[in-house]
Each structure stands twice: as structure tokens, then as C-alpha cells.
Amino acid sequence: MDRHEASKSSTNKKVAVFTGTRAEYGLLFWLLKDIQNDPQLKLQLLVSGMHLSPEFGETYQQIENDGFVIDEKIEILLSSDSAVGTAKSMGLGVLGFADALARLQPDVLVILGDRFEALAAAQTAMILRIPIVHLHGGEITEGAYDDAIRHAITKLSYLHGTSTEEYRQRVIQLGEEPNRVINVGAIGLDHLKRATFLTVEQLSKSLGFQLNKPFVVVTYHPVTLADEAPEVSFQALLDALDDFPELQVILTYPNADDGGRRIIPILEEYAGRDPQRVLAIPSLGQVRYLSSIMHASAVIGNSSSGIIEVPSFDVPTVNIGVRQKGRLAAKSILNTEPNHTDISNAISMAISRSYKDEDEVIDNPYGQGDASAQVIEMIKSLKFDASKVFYDLKFNDM
């Protein structure tokens, strides 16, 4: 009897969940709570990547403050800002995840998205015959190598929770059997129904930064598969913000992709010039981040959150460059080239709300905020067979 057969007779199914970034953890928060509180499941939390880096805010502390026990911390980040450094970090990840998963012996591993850290965890779990539940597969982001990583994780995974029906069909197109692919919606939208948000006054106190004017939230990440130099594009964004001195600015740090570290000193220097107007912060945490979005005049940058979560708050997004190219997008997503003039024009359109009719309600294509319960049901009903069948549309749709 192997480990998966033995688990069926045990009281608790061991569910390992991987997180490597602040953004991913914020999306997984309610799923983690639901696993933690389910008497039939035992949560095992693997934390790695940016969470463990002082440079990016040591956000593992927030995870612990939220009441979670971190079962394994896997150090993988090198003090590097290059593609070679990223590739080496993935190698370190495989070594660390092999030891961690061998110790934990989980019955299933949950992975969200498309990060290089997640790929290292996924390929390790596949070799160890640990079934993977993958969330947010089937999506397209043509401007980043995350796109290829996401599809690779799909092929390494056994069950799939997609954020839209179109993405569900794409996962099936990749050869995954339809009964193993479920459209659960975007899991980050569970916050809309379950989180308690801060008022502007509470947010100001929490940040130690007085928000007394209209403000925007800005997050810009490197573009890893296009000719879009991060320093140049980010400087164009800052120059565009200078066209709106009446707006305060909350600037969050970039992620750990190659090129991200080159943005940080530019960001800090910009904030230091006018600390009453601009706040630079490594990580807001999910409650402060979503509270900031709720009260913001606009969200600006190239984060997936601007596409997936922000429209549900009826807040516009200025999406810069090609990093998110290919994603389904609501009408409130204003796409712009990464240059000063175009970004400035898009910000003007966003804060004036001229992209929509006065009483128009923006429809978010990514679900209704009930994904966690569906993922829990997927985990509980999992019946794993390591010899996964390739679902070929050419034959099955005849």
C-alpha cells in the first residue's frame, strides 16, 4: 500500500500549500484558513522566495502574525538580479523542496500561478509522486516568462482550478481531462465576501502615512520576455505621476524577477523627495493592500492584481506595457504603452472615470468570490493516479 492509499484510511488528509511571494499569499489567505479549520484536513505550509528576504520585507512574519504555522522555510533567493541568478535559485529550490516534501509527506500540494519558485516546487512534487492542485492555470501573460512557467505547472499538476471558463478550456486544450479541470473563479476574490477592510483613517494610522488627498496605488514589476527595460519604463511611470501633484502615491516594491532590484533604489529616491506625498513600502499585506485599492482613485502598474481583483472594487487600472498581455480584462482596465505621455493620458482617463458611463457597473469576468470552498471540495475528492492520461481533443471531440 503506497502513501496515497494509506492516506485514505487516515483521519486527516495532509494538504501542503506553497507560497513564495506576498501577492500569492494574499490570494491564498482564505483557502489557508479553510484548510486550517477543516477537521478532515491538516495544513502544511511551505514558505520560500521573497517571503524570507529582508530586501523584500521578510513577509513570512505576516504569515505567522495571521496565525499560521510555517512547517518549512526553503531559502532559495540569491543576491542577484539576473536571469542566471533566477535559474540558480530554481536549482536551489529543487534541492530544498525535495528535503521539505520528503519530511512532510503530504497527500497533496496546492500551488497557485506561475512563479519560478512555484515551478521548482511543482517539478519536485511530480517526481515524488505528490499530486498537485494548480490554481489559475490556462491564463496568458505574453510579456513574461511566467506564461511558459504557468503552462509547465499545468502539465505537472493533477487537478486544476481555473479562474474563468475560457481558461478552463485552455487547460483542457493542453491535454488535461475535463473532469479534472474546474472553473472555480479567481480565489483572491474571496476577500470581497469575507475580509474586513480598513477605513481611510485606519489605513493611514496603520501605514504611518496621512492619506488626506486622493491617492493611487502603484506596483510595477520587471517585464521578462519583452524589450521593456525596467528602469526606463518605471521612470516613465514616475514622470507621469509628476503630472498629477494633487494625487498622493502608495508605491509597493517590485517582485524578485531579474531586473526588479534595479527598480528599488529609483523607487526609494522618488519617495524620499516628497515623503508627504509618496509612501514607498516593501509590502502592504493583503488587508492593507485591498483596503488601499478600495479607497484609491486608480491602481497603476503591471501587476496581475490590477487585472483580476481591482475591477471588483469599481476602481480603474492603468495597465502598463505587455507584462499582462493576453489576460481577459474588464472595461476598467486601461492599457497603455510604457512611455510618459501615454501613461499620463491613461491616468487622466482613469481618475476622470471617462472610460465608462456614469451609472455603468463594471463586470469582472473572474468570478464571484466563492473559490475556496470549491477548492476544498476538489482536495477532499482527490483520487490520484500517477499515470495521467493525455486528453487529446482531436480524438475525444470527434
Image: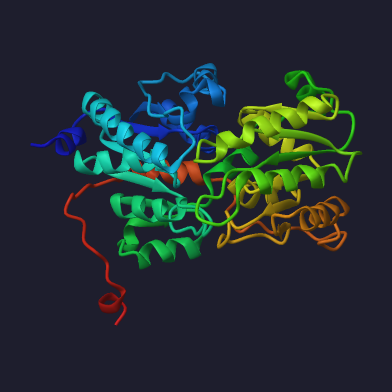
Residue 87 falls left or right of residue 210: left
Q: Would residue 86 be seen by someone viewing this image from the given angle?
A: yes
Give the camera-side residue of 176 and 4: 176
Which quarter of the rendering shows the C terminus? bottom left
Which quarter of the rendering shows the N terminus? top left
Residue at far left of view: 1
Residue 247 falls left or right of residue 268: right
Within the image, what quadrant is residue 189 found in?
top right
Image x and y of residue 79, in percent: 46, 27
Residue 142 falls left or right of residue 284: left
Q: Would residue 299 be seen by someone viewing this image from the given angle?
A: no
Image x and y of residue 337, in percent: 70, 59
Residue ID at (15%, 38%): 5
Give the camera-side residue of 23 and 162: 23
Image x and y of residue 347, in percent: 81, 51
Within the image, what quadrant is residue 10 found in?
top left
Q: How many marks?
A: 0
Residue 37 falls left or right of residue 8: right
Residue ID at (57%, 23%): 57
Give the camera-side residue of 63 and 121: 121
How has the structure been colored for display? rainbow
Residue ID at (29%, 31%): 97
Within the image, what quadrant is residue 264 found in?
top right
Image x and y of residue 59, in percent: 53, 23
Residue at far bottom of view: 398
Give the camera-side residue of 154 and 177: 154
